[in-house]
Image: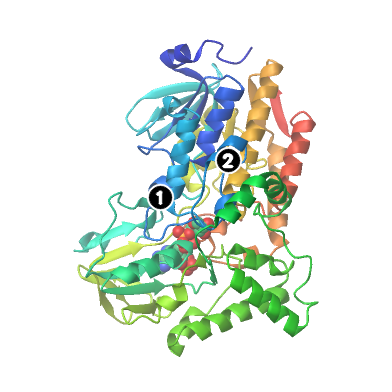
Amino acid sequence: MDGFASQPKAAAGRSGVYDALIVGAGFSGLYQLLRLRDRLGLAALVLEAGDGVGGTWYWNRYPGARCDSESHSYSYYFSEELLRDWEWSERYPEQPEILRYLNHVADRFDLRRDIRFGTRVSAARHDEAENLWRVTTEAGESFAARFLITAVGCLSTANVPNIPGLDEFKGEWYHTGQWPHGGVDFTGKRVGQIGTGSTGIQAAPVIAAQAAHLTVFQRTANYSVPARNAPLSPDFLRWSKENHAEIRRVMHSTTNGHPFTISERSALDATPEERLSAYEAAWEKGGLQFRAAFRDILTDKAANDTAAEFIRAKIREIVKDPETAAKLTAFDHPFAAKRPPIDTEYFETFNRPNVSLVDVRASPIERITPRGIETRDAEHELDVIVFATGFDAMTGPLLNIDIRGRGGLRLKDAWAAGPRTYLGLGVPGFPNLFTVTGPGSPSVLCNMPVAIEQHVEWITGCIEHMRKRGLGLIEAEADAADRWVEHVNEAADATLLPQASSSWYLGANVPGKPRVFMPYAGGMAWYRGICEDVAAKGYEGFALAD
Ligand code: NA7
């Protein structure tokens, strides 16, 4: 077994040299550990900053935190027993339930014994002489392994905007992605929420129901479709268990890895009546499926306009105050060009007497004062500020670690002009590094567990291939990465996605971040085929060595 630590696991642990170190114990890290340890028998260790499993779902405990993928699809599909055992309670899983699920997975497969909690990785350096990754933690511990696998998530680096005066604010403030474990009591409080992305749209109705007053600071008006969340019926649960193979087949055959197919019809071929009736049906059904009402909503601006106009009319119908409705519908981008939220009574919330909306594009936030938030036109007195301001997405979690490859090349420098990967899985100059759901892969454009299972299984297959052939080194080739980056751009340009100029898909939400469309928009099913083809051709585009 050349190139691999052949000693038993415990010995590998004692000497500090593992076959693989996995960073992160969320959906990706847990499954990666299971595959490498139990399928390949490798010595693998997960290093996790949090004190428990869950990743995104460990940190994002804000009010209303819920997944926008439907429960029966937001699950691992690798184990029939697991699918049979676990019972979701609602159409969309709430954060505590997802966390319970991931804890159940960790226990069921006895994963905890190979996870080091409370261990934040600060640096990783490839030691060329030894062909090992040397990893150091914030606490100063060191580990070494042949492979380094980042399972750090795409949305795990909180973006707290640099607004002057925050230090002087006399009240409390929180970022939704770093929410206190004990929760926050808003009773009797005047709350200001900055941000109206998926998070803000989930949080606002729940905060408004408790707080004395909620002021929502909106920079970009956002589309949202009702989620129509509800408890799952015993019939549905039975159906989803009996039909898991078919559900998986659908998820694997679609662009976004969701358990529904996209209509084959163009919005522009339908008569106005047919279109209206299709949108009404989709609105009633609710959820991300709305995007699938017609095949060209994401590719043809005229088709997209019909969806945008329908949603605008719905918001005007719901929101009683015409001025507030006008602010909420002043969209500057096509529908779903930014990640489309789904909601539970978001627009209805603005009919409450204790909720107000401030358009910070018309009247920008100038500073935070000891008493609240000051915009160009007014000071809003607040007891609590909630930053629902998103994440330094996709590259942030990787660049937060000082990763150095060949010749000390820093990932930060290699990606100065934007992320450059091959398949979102490998980076030239960084041998034996695999990035689960890395930039350049479908990841956030896909139902995440589907993307994660595909990456983990591909990486496992690749390591198994190397082991069988006695190979100890794999590295993405520079031209393969260049061609892939070009293809990622072409795939994005074939859609309306790059037209949302403030989108985090483009890195535009973080000042100074290079504007590059990061996820692969060519579709999950297509992407899976490409990865399989690369593997079948002996890992074409990767250089392999002893
Ligand atoms: P998002 O989607 O990045 O949303 C962040 C929101 O915060 C968005 O409305 C931003 O406005 C707003 N924002 C960010 N910075 C500021 C400042 N400085 N001033 C005012 N408003 C600001 O993050 P989420 O957490 O909602 O969702 C992330 C993903 O998690 C989501 O897409 C799902 O995939 C799950 P902007 O639109 O940039 O003008």
**In this rendering, the label closer to the viewer, 1 or 2:** 2
Looking at the rendered structure, the kind of residue marked 1 is Pro
Tell me the SS state at disc 2: helix
Q: Nearer the viewer, residue 72 or 236?
A: 236
Report the residue marked by disc 1.
Answer: 96
Is any atom of residue 271 visible in this view? yes
Tell me the SS state at disc 1: helix
How packed mark 2 is, by other alpha carbons closer than 10 Å (few <14, some 14-19, many 20 or more), is some
Location of the C terminus (image quadrant): top right
Query: Could you tell me which residue is drawn at 61 percent across and 21 percent down?
Result: 40
Image spot of residue 129 (x, y percent): 55, 17
Query: Could you tell me which residue is drawn at 35 percent across and 79 percent down?
Result: 356
Query: Could you tell me which residue is drawn at 68 percent across and 21 percent down?
Result: 466
Looking at the rendered structure, the kind of residue marked 2 is Arg
Q: Which mark is residue 84?
A: 2
Q: Residue furthest front?
A: 235
- Please say if 310 is above or below 451: below
Q: Residue furthest bottom?
A: 322
Query: Could you tell me which residue is drawn at 29 percent across and 54 percent down?
Result: 183
Location of the N terminus (image quadrant): top right
Q: Which mark is residue 383?
A: none
